[in-house]
Image (tube, helix red, strand yellow):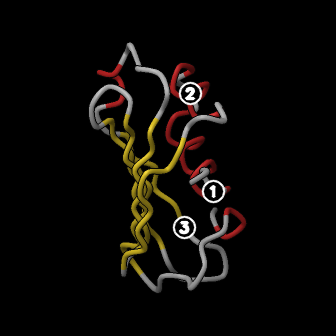
Amino acid sequence: MQLTNLELFALDKLLHDHEPAVEALKSPVATVLERVETPAGFYSVIQLQQRLASAGELLEREWKFRLKRLKSAGYFVCWLDGESTLCLEAVISRGVRPAVFTPELFV
């Protein structure tokens, strides 16, 4: 599966300062191995076609957000699982989870 606009948005917020990861995610061969909707958000497993040399910088990253027009808040978190697999999770920690996540909802 291809990365969705929301996954790309979240990963841009999380990894904007990590050029090797950004380049790997822009590659058309980066694929989503698994995407699961959860009661609090979603979870994705992303396979990159290249190893990330500075993996220590990607142990875990978090970006907190609020949702426009909803009294909801949460966070995106990502971490490296192995040398070329990235996990991404979105969690609504306060308020109501929207029926559909889109980048336009986030503050």
Earlier in the chain: of badge 1 and badge 2, it is 1
In the depicted structure, whether residue 82 falls above or below residue 100 = above
Label 3 CA crowd tier, 10 Å (few <14, some 14–19, many 20+): some
Q: Residue at x 56, y 54 (%)?
A: 1
Q: Secondary structure at mark 3?
A: strand
Q: Secondary structure at mark 2?
A: helix
Q: Position of residue 80 (x, y in %)?
A: 33, 35
Residue type at mark 3 is Arg
Residue at the extreme right: 104
Q: Position of residue 35 (x, y in %)?
A: 44, 62
Q: Which label number is shown at residue 66? A: 3
How far apart are the two marked residues, 2 and 3, measured between alpha carbons? 28 Å
In the depicted structure, whether residue 3 falls above or below residue 37 = above
Q: Which label number is shown at residue 62? A: none
Q: Check whether the beta carbons of the residues at disc 1 and disc 3 lie within 8 A of each other.
A: no
Q: Residue at x 55, y 82 (%)?
A: 98
Label 2 CA crowd tier, 10 Å (few <14, some 14–19, many 20+): some
Report the quarter where the C terminus lies: bottom right
Residue at the extreme top: 53
Residue type at mark 2 is Ala
* Side (left or right) of 42 relative to 15: left
How far apart are the two marked residues, 1 and 2, measured between alpha carbons? 15 Å
Q: Position of residue 26 (x, y in %)?
A: 65, 33
In the depicted structure, whether residue 34 falls above or below residue 12 = below
Q: Nearer the viewer, residue 45 or 1?
A: 1
Q: Secondary structure at mark 1?
A: loop
Q: From the image, tell me which residue sits under label 1.
A: 4
Residue type at mark 1 is Thr
Q: From the image, tell me which residue sits under label 2.
A: 24
